[in-house]
Image (cartoon, rainbow, N blue to C red):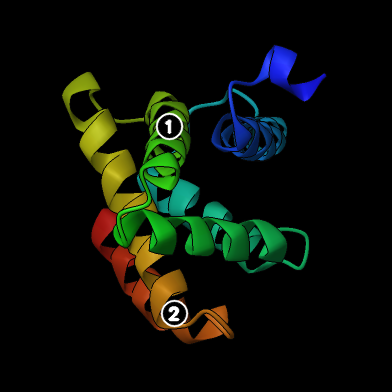
Amino acid sequence: MLLYYFKNKDDLVAAVLMEIGAELGATLEGAFGTTPLSPANALTTLWQMAKSDAFAPHMRLFLDLSSRAGRGDAVMQDVVSQMGEGWIVWLAGLLDVSAEEQRPMANLILGAMDGQVVLFPSDLSQGDAAIALLKGFLE
């Protein structure tokens, strides 16, 4: 029956992962609402969420997917690209900056957070100082 809906295992895995990414996106949308935020406030709120126990499994999964994508797994490259694009578009639309700055600012915020996750996967609090410094630059 699965072959009716999916061409192969890779398509099934990609669909499951995209669903997980969509659920995370919906959670973020629910937590943030639609009120525009300054980049500093968006960064701070996202970082606190990233460090929460509720988000830890999502962070570990995204780290694993990104690692596989970096090693050349074409399916994971596609999944990570689609997830990342969705989060960038979502965050860019939420930021209270000029239209020209929205996407680069979203890239900066998410890239800084992802960097801390890569550097400190077992203790994200070690990234607090770097995030606080970036927040200061954004204010």
Type of the residue with mark 2: Gly
Indicate whether 131 appears above or below 87: below
Picture quadrant of residue 67: bottom left
Residue 84 percent coordinates (x, y) = 41, 39
How far apart are labels 2 and 1 at the CA level?
A: 26 Å
Disc assigned to residue 127? 2
Residue 132 percent coordinates (x, y) = 40, 72
Type of the residue with mark 1: Gln
How crowded pointer 2 is (Cα within 10 Å; few <14, some 14-19, many 20+) is rated as some
Q: Find numbered disc 1 in the image and state the secondary structure of the residue it sits on.
A: helix
In the rendered image, is residue 127 in sight?
A: yes
Residue 104 percent coordinates (x, y) = 21, 38
Residue sitting at 35 percent across and 52 percent down?
109
Pick whichever, 33 or 111, lies toward us: 111
Q: Find numbered disc 2 in the image and state the secondary structure of the residue it sits on.
A: helix
Picture quadrant of residue 131: bottom left
Pick whichever, 108 or 21, lies toward us: 21
Disc assigned to residue 82? 1
Q: On the picture, is 127 further left or further right than 61?
A: left
Compare marks 2 and 1 and give the one earlier in the sequence.
1
Q: On the picture, is 139 further left or further right than 23?
A: left
Indicate whether 125 appears above or below 135: below
Residue sitting at 42 percent across and 60 percent down?
68
Pick whichever, 95 or 84, lies toward us: 84
